[in-house]
């Protein structure tokens, strides 16, 4: 297998909307309409006269931030048609049969296209024989305003952020939109997560009701979660809404650790100012206090799911419950980490999956330069080692999910 060749071929086919994937395999579009969104404006905790004066001054003098980011922050989530009506994709054999087993693939934070995941999905399908569902998180992939994926426009926003926050680290055109969104409205991380959670439940109910053209109502469903997608997979597996995940397994790659143990500062994810705002908002001393009552109310309305979210987002909330919850699914989870991953480090994984959970972790290291964002770089220099490493990691994932 040549990973670099497969990446380029699949990316080009996907771009050209050619649904022929590899020999005997196709990728199919499934139209979807989200019935869940939570209209929230900027948190009340930031509303004071001085803040408003400074923010208005900033926006009057920074047209790109105003036009492409802040006008979205002041609009309700329900006003974004692209986040409500979109397609998800199913990788399956090129035949007319409905599949009897599938893997739900959940991607990472701040992803704008499926390119990285196409070889992952194709390998999992080919190796396990199961269909692979590529489902986008709310306000990610093509569920986000198209301007957020425009390097020229987002570079302007990044420059404006650097002027506003002189000591900001790792601001870039790639993370400018999400960084601004989460710095000024960190509650959107939760709101988008809740919407995605509800969307996935809807997808599974549609499958069980026989309303999916490609997947049988009786099909088994497992999950593969990468980065923040692993976090969402944990909540789905533990909460098990309507028994939909009773027989599911979850493989987590470069993710799964408690979120307060992660270090998401990266030019490809969010910058340091956004990370600081998120950690403060969801910190033990602040979450649910002073302007975040609506968010706590939202969590409370989901009963157990809200508790699960809080227990996995911060190690200080319910440490005993966190350990109990993870132990309750220990036979159904596998964690694959990378030793040089700086976002979900080996230390963060071992902290989270301790107390009898150590055997769920497999750590890998590669003989080439890699990162959390690019575990398998597309270059010819390290082609042979990348091929070997990719097959080793996804071979382990496929074996667990088979």
Image (tube, rainbow, N blue to C red):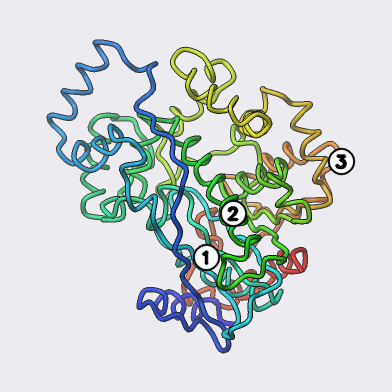
Precedes in sequence: disc 3 or disc 2: 2
Residue for point 65% across, 29% down: 303
Percent of width and height locating residue 295: 50, 25
How far apart marks 3 and 2 lie (CA) works out to 23 Å
Residue for point 72% across, 68% down: 398
Question: Which quadrant of the structure image shows residue 158?
Answer: top left
- Residue at the far bottom in the pictured view: 23
| Mark 3 secondary-structure assignment | loop
Q: Which mark is residue 226?
A: 2
Q: Is residue 226 above or below residue 281?
A: below
Q: Residues within 10 Å of mark 1 (few under 14, many from 20)?
A: some
User: Which residue is labeled 1 in the image?
Assistant: 117
Q: Which mark is residue 356?
A: 3
The residue lying toward the viewer, choosing from 293 and 186, is 293
Percent of width and height locating residue 400: 77, 63
- Residue at the far right in the pictured view: 356
Q: Is residue 68 above or below residue 62?
A: below
Precedes in sequence: disc 1 or disc 3: 1
Residue for point 60% across, 82% down: 93
* Left or right for 312, reference 41: right
Q: Are marks 1 and 2 in contact (CB under 8 Å)?
A: yes
């Amino acid at each position: 297998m040549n990973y670099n060749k497969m990446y380029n071929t699949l990316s080009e086919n996907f771009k050209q909307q050619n649904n022929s994937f590899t020999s005997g395999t196709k990728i199919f579009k499934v139209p979807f309409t989200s019935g869940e969104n939570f209209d929230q404006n900027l948190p009340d905790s930031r509303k004071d006269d001085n803040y408003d004066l400074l923010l208005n001054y900033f926006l009057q003098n920074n047209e790109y931030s105003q036009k492409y980011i802040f006008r979205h922050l002041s609009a309700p989530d329900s006003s974004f048609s692209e986040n409500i009506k979109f397609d998800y994709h199913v990788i399956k054999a090129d035949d007319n049969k409905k599949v009897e087993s599938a893997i739900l693939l959940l991607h990472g934070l701040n992803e704008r296209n499926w390119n990285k995941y196409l070889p992952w999905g194709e390998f999992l399908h080919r190796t396990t024989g199961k269909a692979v569902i590529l489902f986008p998180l709310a306000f990610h992939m093509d569920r986000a305003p198209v301007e957020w994926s425009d390097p020229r426009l987002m570079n302007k926003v990044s420059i404006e952020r650097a002027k506003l926050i002189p000591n900001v680290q790792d601001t870039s055109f790639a993370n400018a939109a999400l960084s601004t969104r989460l710095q000024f409205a960190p509650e959107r991380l939760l709101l988008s997560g809740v919407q995605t959670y509800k969307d996935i439940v809807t997808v599974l109910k549609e499958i069980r009701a026989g309303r999916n053209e490609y997947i049988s109502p009786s099909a088994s469903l497992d999950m593969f979660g990468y980065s923040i997608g692993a976090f969402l997979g944990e909540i789905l597996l533990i909460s098990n809404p309507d028994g939909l995940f009773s027989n599911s397994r979850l493989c987590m790659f470069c993710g799964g650790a408690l979120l307060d143990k992660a270090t998401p500062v990266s030019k490809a994810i969010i910058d340091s100012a956004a990370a600081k705002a998120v950690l403060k908002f969801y910190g033990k001393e602040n979450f649910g206090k002073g302007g975040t009552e609506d968010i706590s109310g939202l969590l409370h309305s989901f009963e157990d799911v809200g508790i699960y979210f809080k227990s996995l987002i911060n190690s200080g909330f319910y440490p005993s419950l966190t350990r109990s919850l993870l132990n309750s699914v220990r036979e159904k989870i596998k964690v694959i980490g990378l030793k040089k991953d700086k976002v979900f480090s080996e230390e963060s994984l071992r902290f989270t999956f301790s107390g009898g959970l150590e055997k769920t972790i497999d750590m890998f290291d590669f003989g080439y330069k890699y990162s959390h964002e690019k575990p398998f770089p597309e270059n010819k220099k390290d082609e042979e080692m990348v091929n070997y490493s990719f097959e080793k990691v996804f071979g382990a994932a496929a074996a667990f999910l088979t």
